[in-house]
């Protein structure tokens, strides 16, 4: 970790002047769609679409009509907006002409178009509003690219149709159009869009619709039938169409890094040498020295104002007596202490004397010769100038070897 930190520091030191110069002269800031996109303002990403095409209607009796005679024209106009590169919506007016087959008296039947199989040709006109929710599949799965030419979008929606049918005069002839019904429809579709410029796109719109309320049988309830449609269209793109993207810096590469590589290699060698020196130092044997200890042989501590020895103290003094008897040529000094923060001087003087005398008597009782022992008192502080916080350490008798 230290090596990495040092290398980073050296890199910053070596590269800083050139990076500052490059940023001042050559660094550019551009929008980068690969970093994500930002939602545009509301006035952007609108469009108007005009479509024209054909449809084929599927009802229960339509199979009796020639396939080529079942195609009918259709047209639409939409106004829409993309709210994000993926999601959008459009609102428009649809016109749909339907060719079918039906019984006598059904909506749109043509009395002069009777067939030998008992059916009449029918013709209806639908016009009405619709609303679609759109999703750009290309941007959803492949990511947004501002200069993409082809986009595949799916949509789902629906609306209502005001239905017009042929009016039959007194002679049984078709004469003009009259209102017949109001129906609902639902649809799913795919839009293949080809951008020919920043403002114009061509479209192939493929759609499947379910239309409710249209029937081909007399004296029966309304049913839902299906219709397939295909449109060619042109879309006019309004306002800003490219999506905003995060702004990122574009930094030019360093002109030549050989000098920096050489300096870094030299730094690596120096670091390796320092690491080796550190390892050698850590592996060097540690010299040991015997240090004369000034610590007492033992210390007996007392509660405040107490000079009597406890059972534990007597046990400790018994063990100390054995040490003293095993070293008959060594003399020992017993020193009595008392803290100077509580009690009067006269009381503390007497307390020191009682404490040291009690220890002296116990050691003699345990077999230590009186010639090895010297009892004394000290009216100072055992712990020096540590203060009142440590006064409990001054309530003691110390046992040390005589110097």
Image (cartoon, rainbow, N blue to C red):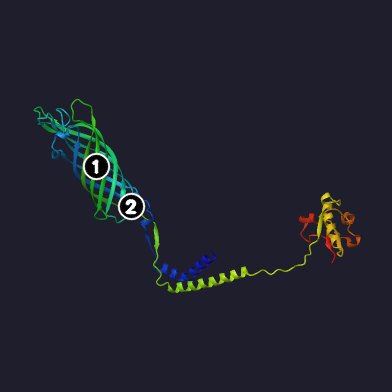
The 10 Å Cα crowd at callout 1, few under 14, some 14 to 19, many 20 or more, is some
Residue plotted at (23% across, 29% down): 222
Q: Earlier in the sequence, mark 1 or mark 2?
A: 2
Residue plotted at (23% across, 45% down): 205
Nearer-the-camera pick, 59 or 293: 293
Residue carrying label 1:
207
Left or right of 74 on screen, residue 330: right
Residue carrying label 2:
142
- Residue 379 can be seen in this image: no
Left or right of 328 on screen, residue 230: left
As drawn, the residue found furthest toward the front would be 326
Q: Vertical placement of 245 versus 11: above or below? A: above
Nearer-the-camera pick, 2 or 281: 281
Q: Secondary structure at mark 2?
A: helix
Residue plotted at (40% across, 60% down): 248
x%, y% of residue 153? Answer: 29, 47
x%, y% of residue 265? Answer: 48, 72
Q: Secondary structure at mark 1?
A: strand
Viewer-side label of 1, 2? 2
Separation (CA) of disc 1 from disc 2: 23 Å
Q: Say how many tags the image has.
A: 2
Quadrant location of residue 209?
Answer: top left
Quadrant location of residue 387?
Answer: bottom right
Left or right of 402 on screen, residue 264: left
Q: Quadrant of the C terminus?
A: bottom right
The 10 Å Cα crowd at callout 2, few under 14, some 14 to 19, many 20 or more, is few
């Amino acid at each position: 970790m230290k090596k990495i930190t040092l290398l980073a520091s050296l890199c910053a030191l070596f590269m800083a002047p050139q990076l500052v110069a490059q940023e001042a002269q050559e660094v550019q800031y551009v929008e980068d769609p690969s970093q994500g996109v930002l939602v545009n303002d509301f006035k952007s990403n609108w469009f108007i679409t005009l479509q024209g095409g054909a449809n084929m209607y599927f009802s229960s009796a339509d199979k009796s009509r020639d396939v080529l005679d079942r195609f009918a024209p259709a047209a639409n106009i939409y106004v829409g907006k993309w709210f994000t590169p993926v999601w959008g919506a459009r609102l428009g007016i649809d016109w749909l002409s339907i060719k079918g087959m039906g019984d006598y008296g059904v909506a749109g039947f043509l009395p002069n178009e009777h067939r030998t199989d008992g059916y009449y040709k029918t013709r209806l006109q639908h016009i009405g509003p619709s609303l679609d929710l759109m999703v750009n599949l290309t941007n959803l799965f492949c990511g947004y690219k501002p200069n993409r030419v082809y986009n595949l979008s799916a949509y789902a929606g629906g609306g209502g149709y005001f239905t017009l049918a042929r009016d039959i005069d007194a002679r049984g002839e078709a004469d003009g159009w009259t209102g017949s019904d109001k129906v609902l429809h639902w649809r799913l579709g795919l839009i293949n869009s080809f951008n020919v410029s920043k403002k114009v796109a061509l479209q192939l719109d493929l759609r499947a619709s379910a239309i409710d309320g249209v029937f081909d049988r007399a004296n029966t309830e309304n049913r839902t039938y299906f219709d397939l449609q295909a449109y060619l269209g042109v879309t006019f793109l309004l306002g800003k169409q490219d999506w905003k993207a995060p702004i990122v810096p574009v930094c030019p590469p360093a002109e030549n890094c050989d000098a920096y590589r050489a300096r870094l290699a030299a730094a690596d060698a120096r670091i390796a040498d320092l690491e080796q020196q550190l390892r050698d130092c850590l592996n060097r044997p540690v010299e040991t020295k015997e240090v004369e200890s000034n610590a007492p042989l033992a210390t007996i501590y007392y509660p405040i104002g107490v000079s009597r020895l406890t059972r534990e103290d007597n046990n400790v003094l018994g063990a100390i007596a054995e040490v003293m008897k095993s070293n008959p040529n060594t003399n020992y000094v017993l020193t009595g202490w008392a803290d100077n923060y509580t009690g009067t001087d006269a009381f503390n003087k007497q307390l020191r004397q009682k404490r040291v005398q009690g220890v002296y008597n116990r050691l003699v009782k345990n077999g230590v010769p009186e010639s090895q022992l010297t009892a004394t008192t000290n009216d100072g502080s055992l712990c020096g100038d540590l203060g009142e916080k440590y006064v409990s350490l001054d309530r003691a008798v110390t046992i040390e070897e005589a110097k």
